[in-house]
Image: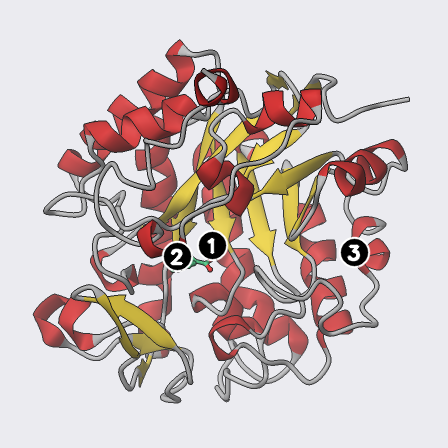
Amino acid sequence: MTGLFDTYRLGDLTLSNRIVMAPLTRNRAAAGNVPTALMAEYYAQRASAGLIVAEATQVVPEGQGYQDTPGIHSAEQVAGWKRVTDAVHARGGRIFLQLWHVGRVSHVSLQPGGQAPVAPSAIRAKTKTFVNGTFTDVSEPRALRLDELPGIVAGYRKGAANAIAAGFDGVEIHGANGYLLDQFLRDGINQRTDAYGGSIENRARLMLEASQAIVEEIGTARTGIRLSPVTPANDAADSNPQPLFNHVVEQLDRLGLVYIHVIEGSTGADREYGAPFDYGALRSRFRGSWITNNGYDRAMAENAIASGRADMVAFGRPFISNPDLVERLRRDSPLAQLNRATLYGGGVEGYTDYPPLQAAAE
Ligand code: 8OZ
C-alpha cells in the first residue's frame, strides 16, 4: 500500500515523500518586494517536505495586492529567491514558486502610480487586503482592455522564466482564491462581452493562455496549477462551478501540466462548503499528478493516498508552526499550534522561531 512517506515521482523529480508545503502568504519581503535571508532560513527549515510551494509571488508590479509580498519581476527579486532555492536545495528539498496576479484584490496604495487595480470587470470585491499593518477594504478596480490581455499572459511567461533563473524546480500557477485568473473564470465576477467573458470556454481562456505560455517557456514537467472550485474566498462566486471546472481541468490535461493542486471547500475553512461538488469528476479528467488540500490531518492524508484519491497532500497552517511537520507526522507526534498574531508581516517571531520537536523537548 502506498503511504504518505513513500517517495513520489513528479515530472522529472523524485520527491522524498507525498507531503507538500502549501503556499502561505507571510508578508516578510524587504523593500522592492525582495526575498530576504530570513525567508531563506524559513524555507530551509521546512525542506523535509516532499515539495515546498513557495508563497504567492506577483509576476508584475500590478499583480501585488498586499504589503510586503515578494515579486519575481526584477533582477533583485530573482537574486533574493536564488538564496531561498539554494538554501532549500542544500537541505535536499524541492521547491516550486507560486505565480500570482491578484487582479481586483488590491489597493491603490500598492499599485504603480496609485492607479486602480485591474480586473475582468469594474466590480469591486467585497473583501479586505492587508496594507500598512491593517486589514482594509480593497479598491474599486477598472476592467482590463482586450488589448491588455496579451501583456498579462506575457507577465506569467516572464515570471516562469525568472523563477527557473532563480533556481526553482518549477512553478505553480495561482488559479485559486478569487485572484485574477479565478476572477476571469467566474460568472459572478466576469461580466465581459468579448472572447474572455460569457461562455465557460471564454471565461477559461485567460487561465489557459497563461498556462500554455508557461508550458512553452519552461515545459510541462515544471508547471503545476492550484484551483479552488467552490471557495468563496475574496468574493469568488460562480453559478455553476462543476461544468466550469470540468472544462478547465480537461483543457489543463490537454496542455499536459504536471499537477493540479485542489483546495476542497472553503479555503482555510469548511471542507464541506459548496457541497455537493464532485472532485472525482475533476481527477478523472486529468492524467497528471493530483495534490489535495484543506484541513487534512494525518489520518485523512493517509487515507487520501492509500485510496488513490490523491498522489500528494498539501498542508498549510500546520507547516507554519511545525517546521519538522514531516517528522512529526511520521512519529504521530503532537503538532504545535500557530500564533495568528504573527501570520502577516514582522520578522523572526512566529516565523523562524517555531522549534522542531527535538529542540522543543529539550
Ligand atoms: C492569505 C492572505 C493573503 C493572501 C491566498 C495568496 O489565499 C493568498 C493569501 C492568503 O491564496
Callout 1 amino acid: Ala
> Mark 1 CB in 8 Å range of ligand 1?
no
Q: Tell me the quarter of the picture where residue 146 sits.
A: bottom left
Relative horizontal placement of residue 303, taking residue 171 as reference (left or right):
right
Callout 2 amino acid: Val
Relative horizontal placement of residue 263, taking residue 125 as reference (left or right):
right
Q: Position of residue 359 (x, y in %)?
A: 43, 17
Marks 2 and 1, Cα distance to the nearest angstrom? Answer: 5 Å
Badge 3: residue crowd in 10 Å (few <14, some 14–19, many ≥20): many
Q: Examine the rendered structure and indicate whether residue 300 appears above or below residue 343.
A: above
Q: Is residue 264 visible?
A: yes
Q: Position of residue 138 (x, y in %)?
A: 30, 79
Mark 2 touches mark 3? (CB < 8 Å): no
Mark 2 touches mark 1? (CB < 8 Å): yes
Q: Tell me the quarter of the picture where residue 238 sits.
A: bottom right
In the rendered structure, which disc, 2 or 1, sits on the residue that comes first in sequence?
Answer: 2
Relative horizontal placement of residue 297, taking residue 92 as reference (left or right):
right
Q: Examine the rendered structure and indicate whether residue 280 appears above or below residue 165.
A: below
- Under circle 1, the secondary element is helix
Q: Residue at x 65, y 72 (%)?
A: 201
Can you tell which mark lies on residue 210? 1
Q: Which residue is denoted by mark 3 in the rendering?
A: 282
Relative depth, front residue between 128 and 74:
128
- Under circle 2, the secondary element is helix
Relative depth, front residue between 339 and 312:
339
Q: Which residue is denoted by mark 2 in the rendering?
A: 153
Relative depth, front residue between 225 and 196:
225
Q: Position of residue 119 (x, y in %)?
A: 37, 77
In the rendered structure, which disc, 3 or 1, sits on the residue that comes first in sequence?
Answer: 1
Which dot, 3 or 1, sits closer to the camera? 3
Q: Tell me the quarter of the picture where residue 98 sits.
A: top left
